Amino acid sequence: MTLAAEVANRLGGAIGAHRLICAEEELASYAIDGLVPSAILRPASPEEAAEVVRFAIAEKLTVLPAGSRSKWELGMTPDRFDIAIDTTGWHAIPHFDPGDLTLSVDAGMPLRELEQFLKEKGQFLPLAVPCFESATIGGTIASGIDSALRLQYGSARDFLIGAEFIDGAGQLCRSGGRVVKNVTGYDLHKLLIGSLGTLGVITRVNFRTSPLPAVSGGHLAEFENCQAALQFRRAVDKTGLSLANLEILSPEVSELIRVILQKSGHPVPAGLETKDWRVYSSFEGNEEVVQRIGRDLQKLARDAGAPGNRVLEKTEDESIGGMLRECFEWLRWASAATVICRLALPVLKVETLAAVSQLSESARLRWALLVRAAGVVYFAVFAESEGGWELEPLKHIVIGVRSIAQAEQGCCTLLHAPAEIKSKATVSNLPGDALLHQRVKRAFDPSGLFAPGRIVGGI
Amino acid sequence: MKSLLGPKNVLDQQLDLLLYEFDGSVEKARPDLVVFPHTTREVSEIVKCAARYEVPIVGRGAGTGLSGGALARGGGVMIVFARMNRILEVDLENRRAVVQPGVVNLDLTRAVEESGLYFAPDPSSAKSCTIGGNVAENAGGPHTLAYGVTTNHVVALELVLPDGEIVRVGSKHGDTAGYDLCGLFVGSEGTLALVTEITVKLLRKPEAVKTLLAIFETIEDASQAVVEITAKGITPAACEMMDGWTLQVVEDYIHAGFPRDSGAVLLLEVEGLREAVEAQAQAIAEVCGTCHAREVRVAKNDRERELLWKGRKNAFGALGRIAPSNYVLDGVIPRSKLPQALQRIKDIGGKYGFQIGNIFHAGDGNLHPIVLYEPRVKGQFENAIAASGEIIRSCVEMGGALTGEHGVGMEKNELMSLLFSDADFALMRRVHDAFNPDSSLNPGKIFPLSKGCGEIRVKKRETAGVAI
């Protein structure tokens, strides 16, 4: 399916035919859950993209901004998908003040390239997110995906200090600024985090950067069961030790990490093959601080009755740390039909986690649990065939997990699933504020052209 | 209103209303009625009642705000949250607290400090300002350098919309499905909804703290030290600057042991694990040394530490002793431009003939020049406003912002065009109208009156306001 030739002609005429792609093969690579766009636009500048948006308003076409599309399947399948605005051509750094630790970067900048740029100045952006090799900075913000360094550095909302974007009126807008402290006007840029392209086309984002730590370290402890691991987590929390990350790995997570590392020829930390629960911690600072935290963690783990625990070698730490950052990426491809639920729980209880995994056990499906820092839980269920007979139990599991999360005053989002089981009932539970969400959506996008239906609740 | 709340909870006499025509800013506007609700339900009823009579509403905490955010610019009903001041829940294990908007900032920390926890945002007015007001203005404070401003510590809100509807946004965890609505409402200066309940994060007190006072011969050296500390990637918990002239005034009043003959001092605090604190304190002392610090003192005990902070936190009060009125400004610049910014402030002060003091959050580039003036001398108030306008403009020219923590309110709404385009205003206006379509809630704030904010007839500003 392509845009009506006449419309395509005018669109090409408006911003240059060479920026309009209608070749079927390319269009197919932009499909979301099988929904193929009619055209791809690669505007040379945000101004040109704004022109495309105004064109779409006039022609009543729908628009979805695209980065590298590494997490393209997050959210619901859009109701309609006419034009993809590809932002990957914009990767300049118009502002970097190393002395102020502030950065302004175009949306299409790849994370890996940005990391390299900042590293040369002894700085970094604490967004340790999956698909790091391919993701763009704009897509990372729009996806709202978790950073593995949240415990120490917060999430994007804590260091995104401003943004520029095209709103649903086809205008280039800005919010916030380039300074680290600022209360001028509404914090509209915060709304863009996790908006999945439904509020506008992000063209540029401003951040407070962080200095690279001098030294970092890692620690791994084994526990007989989930409860013991949770108790250790609690004991660590009470000490006030400042950790960059702390994650609890179910036995299946360890096994997956071991197999993937082995296959890819990376160093495999010893001892990952036992059927234990594990707690991985990472920490940073100067030499003394890192040694002290390592020592304290070893003592805490011994006190908590861990059968095994040790400070990791640098290469081991990098292996496990890197794998945990990428967990969303490898979990989703770990079986023929994987479901990943993300739970945000205000209180972490062993009963809750047991109830969640029991849903899988009952359906005789393999599962993995990763209790991430800051009360976020990834729960993955693996079905070995894409056949319809396994999809029904998967759907029931997702709905079951959702009600468990709700009962615990938390929330549950479906991060990954076969398209067939995505539905309003499964993808996310907009809480009681669905109507408020709609008000925000209409304010940003009065004609509803951005990714309609991508978030449940009529957004 | 009296039948709704009882006569004790309504003020309608001119003499009583007079008390509510000021806040901490130089602005002034009198409400027609002041009401004191005790519950969310009452707030909702008040709002519905005001809507029936098409009367504007403004929320107010303790009235310590510095941009006129809690003033009834359009007259109408002022809802004072002073009697909604209960801490509803403290969850020590998960470090969360649920409070009513009238809870005083410091009272929350006092309620949890025995358990080794505290509420991080610490504006200078922490002893009297309310958490509801902190949320409305997205308040900061000295320690926001390391821990972030109010928005970084709020996870959920209960709100009353201008039609009286009660809604909730955010979650006890903090993460929600969909948009970050909490992030939108915090700092919206009471123009989108009234906040009736707040869930906040509590932090664990650090293992070790060290407070340093670095004394410099010149303000240029002190600001260069801030630039170097930031550029070296050292993040103190606080990094405050006071200029030499201000120091003398403060020392006369507080006797904190500040030098009387220096160009400027930096009050620095480092917090965290013992080993980290030692190393950071040493690194800071070294940087100050290379920037020609005359002396770097380390507070030896809690008493010395508290005295230094007392000097900083009461500095504005001390200045009040030597000039009838002062105007505290709030601007932000990139930290790398600190020396140039301070020079510019000095030049502007010279041009208008004002002594301008500087007591501010140097570590995050948040300037607080204080213009001292005599309101009874004709033209001085107008000149103070003109000088402050020039200072804020120069902040913007350097790549900064209009306000770092005081808010836009009715103080800087006309300056908003320095930063935002018509397209920006159009979007902000649509977001405003999505929640507050009739501008019945806190009219005349944030948006320039010239930019389609014709919904109120603003009373002519009376001059000679006095900051408290």
Image: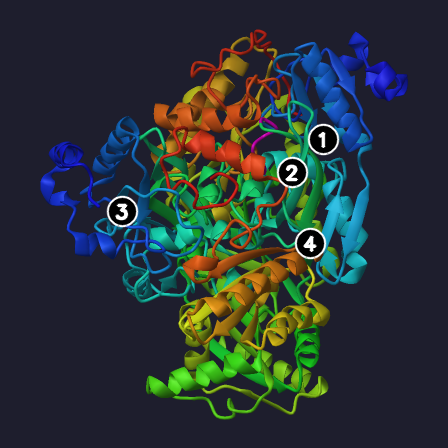
| Chain hosting mark 1 | B
Q: Which residues are magenta?
A: B185-191
Mark 4 → mark 1, Cα distance in angstroms: 29 Å
Element type where label 1 sits in the image: loop
Numbered marks: total: 4
> Are labels 3 and 1 on one chain?
no
Lateral position of residue B438 relative to residue B45, left or right? left
| x and y, in percent, of residue A434 in the image | 57, 39
- Above or below B170: residue A441: above
Element type where label 4 sits in the image: loop
Q: Main secondary structure of the magenta part?
A: loop
Q: Which residue is mark 3?
A: A37
| x and y, in percent, of residue A423 in the image | 49, 52
The amino acid beneath tag 2 is Asn
Mark 2 → mark 4, Cα distance in angstroms: 26 Å
Asked whether residue A282 is in view, the answer is yes
Q: Which residue is mark 2?
A: B134
| Chain hosting mark 2 | B
Seen from the viewer's position, the closer of residues B103 and A187 is: A187
- Quarter of image, res B319: top right
For discs 3 and 4, the disc positioned in front in the rendered view: 3
Q: Which residue is mark 1?
A: B61
The amino acid beneath tag 1 is Gly
Mark 3 → mark 1, Cα distance in angstroms: 51 Å
The amino acid beneath tag 3 is Pro
Q: Residue at x 68, y 73 (%)?
A: A354
Image quarter in which the N terminus of chain B is found: top right
For discs 4 and 1, the disc positioned in front in the rendered view: 4
Q: Which residue is mark 4?
A: A409
Instruction: Evaluate if marks 2 and 1 touch, with contact meaning CB atoms under 8 Å apart.
Output: yes
Q: Residues within 10 Å of mark 2 (few under 14, many from 20)?
A: many
